[in-house]
């Protein structure tokens, strides 16, 4: 019985650690909110669009990438960035976890979304 309590305590501690790590990653990514995109990434210019940062080996990314491709094919302005090939871009944006979506409005970073994201959330953030 004592082993079950210890096991439950370990699982609870790991769950809490995961939540704390997610909070830290989101705070770091959101530090760049308000910065001008062309100051961070001169090659990315435009008014309102999103940057989708993903990794091909990331399970949530594998699920989200087709949804993002469909969103882009429907005319929503967005760019996909494979962080395994463009790690510097992720670093400049403060992105340390994938999948992440950086919302850019009027040339400035407006918001950063992390994890599995509904396409409606991206569209809504771009039209607000």
Image (cartoon, helix red, strand yellow):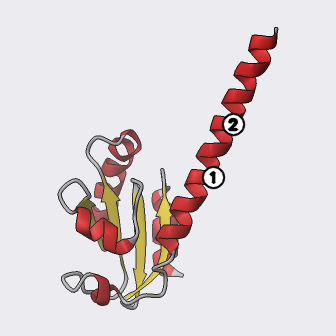
In space, the residues marked 1 and 2 are separated at their CA atoms by: 10 Å
Q: In this picture, is 10 found above or below 79?
A: above
Identify the residue shown where x is 31% and y is 66%: 90
Query: Outermost residue, top direction?
Result: 1
Mark positioned earlier in the residue sequence (1 or 2): 2
Front position in the image: 3 or 83 = 3
Q: Write down the quadrant of residue 71 in the picture.
A: bottom left
- Label 1 CA crowd tier, 10 Å (few <14, some 14–19, many 20+): few
Identify the residue shown where x is 68% and y is 28%: 10
Front position in the image: 26 or 54 = 26
- Label 2 CA crowd tier, 10 Å (few <14, some 14–19, many 20+): few
Q: Which residue is mark 1?
A: 20
Q: Quadrant of the C terminus?
A: bottom right
Identify the residue shown where x is 40% and y is 54%: 99
Q: Position of residue 100 (x, y in %)?
A: 41, 60
Query: Which numbered dot is residue 61?
Result: none
Front position in the image: 127 or 38 = 38
SS at mark 1 in the image: helix
Query: Which numbered dot is residue 13?
Result: 2
Q: Does the rendering let one see residue 76?
A: no
Front position in the image: 35 or 111 = 35
Q: Write down the quadrant of residue 83 in the picture.
A: bottom left
Q: Does the rendering let one see residue 127?
A: yes
Q: Position of residue 77 (x, y in %)?
A: 31, 74
Q: Position of residue 62 (x, y in %)?
A: 33, 42
Q: Are marks 1 and 2 in contact (CB under 8 Å)?
A: no
Q: Write down the quadrant of residue 26 in the picture.
A: bottom right
Q: Quadrant of the N terminus?
A: top right
Q: Position of residue 45 (x, y in %)?
A: 25, 86
In the image: residue 97, left or right of residue 20: left
């Amino acid at each position: 019985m004592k082993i079950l309590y210890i096991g439950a305590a370990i699982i609870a501690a790991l769950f809490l650690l995961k939540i704390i790590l997610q909070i830290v990653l989101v705070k770091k990514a959101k530090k760049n909110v308000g910065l001008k995109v062309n100051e961070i990434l001169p090659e990315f210019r435009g008014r309102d669009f999103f940057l989708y940062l993903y990794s091909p080996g990331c399970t949530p990314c594998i699920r989200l990438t087709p949804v993002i491709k469909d969103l882009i094919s429907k005319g929503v302005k967005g760019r996909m960035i494979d962080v395994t090939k463009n790690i510097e871009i992720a670093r400049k944006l403060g992105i340390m976890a994938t999948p992440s979506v950086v919302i850019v409005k009027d040339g400035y970073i407006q918001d950063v979304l992390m994890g599995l994201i509904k396409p409606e959330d991206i569209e809504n953030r771009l039209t607000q």
